[in-house]
Image (cartoon, rainbow, N blue to C red):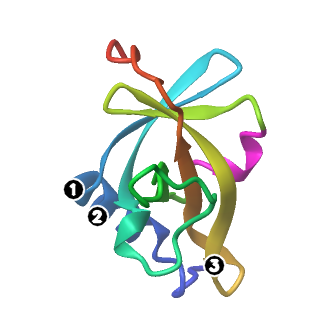
Amino acid sequence: MINILDKSETIEKYLKRLGQSVFIIKDGKTTEVFAVIEQTWKRNKSHFEEKISPIGRYFNRFYIYYGPASYDIRELGDDGYAVIDGEKYYFVQADCVKAGNTVQYFRGVLKKEQGGEGYENL
């Protein structure tokens, strides 16, 4: 039976066109997905931590991840992470967006690791 609400394949096609390459590492295995990454400074109320610099600015190391339904980021746990443009990110929140009972895409909050460079070879 065809599910007319399932647009996950169409969404994944657009993620491949509009998104960027994200390497997700868990248990030593690397998986490449294409996802859209949005900086949280574009949003009002995006301060997840209260760390203010000496000049009164927040350190913004958080990003929103929109990724394909074919890779469940909720299963990463604490030892899984993402590498984007050679920098390391951890998922601090992960959930799915559904239509009916079908997952359309995954959404998460990424936290950039401070000093997390050196992953350019992926």
Give the Cα distance between marks 1 and 3.
22 Å
Give the Cα distance between marks 3 and 2.
17 Å
Front-most of residues 72 and 122: 122
Most extreme residue toward the left is: 17
Quadrant housing residue 37: bottom left
- Residue 75 visible: yes
What residue is rendered at 46% in x and 50% in y?
A: 53
What residue is rendered at 52% in x and 71% in y?
A: 46
Amino acid type, residue under disc 3 in the picture: Lys
Amino acid type, residue under disc 1 in the picture: Arg
Residue 7 in the image: x percent, y percent?
A: 46, 76
The region drawn magenta spans 71-77
Say which label, 3 or 2, has the lower sequence index: 2
Whether residue 67 sits left or right of residue 108 in the image: it is left
Amino acid type, residue under disc 2 in the picture: Tyr
Whether residue 68 sits left or right of residue 3 in the image: it is left
Q: Which residue is mark 1?
A: 17
Label 3: few (<14), some (14–19) or many (≥20) C-alpha neighbours in 10 Å: some
* 33 inside magenta stretch: no
Say which label, 1 or 3, has the lower sequence index: 1
Q: Which residue is mark 2?
A: 14
Q: Are marks 1 and 3 in contact (CB under 8 Å)?
A: no
Relative to 1, say whether 119 is above or below. Answer: above
Residue 14 in the image: x percent, y percent?
A: 28, 64
What residue is rendered at 75% in x and 45% in y?
A: 75
Most extreme residue toward the front is: 54
Give the Cα distance between marks 1 and 2.
5 Å
Circle on res. 98: 3
Whether residue 58 sits left or right of residue 51 in the image: it is left
Q: Quadrant of the C terminus?
A: top left
- Residue 70 visible: no
Q: Are marks 1 and 2 in contact (CB under 8 Å)?
A: yes
